[in-house]
Image: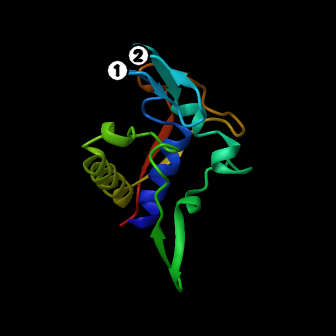
Amino acid sequence: MVYTHAALCESMRLYPPVPTDSKEAVNDDVLPDGTAVKKGTVVTYHVYAMGRMESLWGGDWAEFRPERWLERVEGDKWRFVARDSFSYPVFQAGPRICLGKEMAFLQMKRVVAGVLRSFRVVPTAADGVEPEFISFLTSQMKGGFPVKILQRKV
């Protein structure tokens, strides 16, 4: 499930479940870039935009490439290599990191394995048509994501 884990991370890099988040400073603080933050200031970060930053993901940031999360260890075996949670804050970071992160990955992998074992999921959008992202509290695609479900031959 190493490649599946990488594909899930890459999917959430490009389309994070929660595209923006905010925190309120409980004390005066300084951000890593030197920006002063006064007590009571609300700081918002845009996870969706961070997943598209060339400075974080390289010149191929727009490509869906699960291999960016993998490292070859021996022969044809791969190892998952996580990014630091501040560069990839899909599950928050630091002391606020999601306690259910590992359970969420386990559930996502079980759904992927369960569905793909019996079915093929085929997008039905016309060639070249990209889904339109809508940013609410949770991510959405305008009109949903139309697919055709085909039963696999046993």
Across and down, in percent, residue 18 comes to: 43, 29
Identify the image quadrant of residue 2.
bottom left
Residue 81 visible in image: yes
**Image quarter in which the C terminus is found:** bottom left
Answer whether labels 2 and 1 touch (C-beta < 8 Å): yes
Q: What residue type is labelled 1?
A: Val
Is 71 placed left or right of 5 in the picture? right
Q: What residue type is labelled 2?
A: Lys
* Most foreground residue, 112 or 36: 36
- On screen, 38 above or below 56? above
Residue ID at (35%, 60%): 117
How is the model colour-coded? rainbow
Residue 20 visible in image: no
* Most foreground residue, 136 or 123: 136
Please name the residue that numbered disc 2 is placed on.
39
Please name the residue that numbered disc 1 is placed on.
26
* Most foreground residue, 126 or 31: 31
Residue ID at (43%, 59%): 4
* Most foreground residue, 41 or 143: 41
- On screen, 105 above or below 78? above
- On screen, 152 above or below 150? below
Q: Regarding mark 2 in the picture, which secondary structure is present there?
A: loop
Q: Which residue lies furthest to the top in this view?
A: 40
Q: Tell me the number on the disc at residue 123.
A: none
**Image quarter in which the N terminus is found:** bottom left
Across and down, in percent, residue 13 comes to: 53, 43
Residue ID at (25%, 49%): 103
Q: Regarding mark 1 in the picture, which secondary structure is present there?
A: loop
The crowd level at tag 1 (other Cα within 10 Å; few <14, some 14-19, many 20+) is few
Residue ID at (48%, 63%): 81
Is 83 placed left or right of 54 in the picture? left
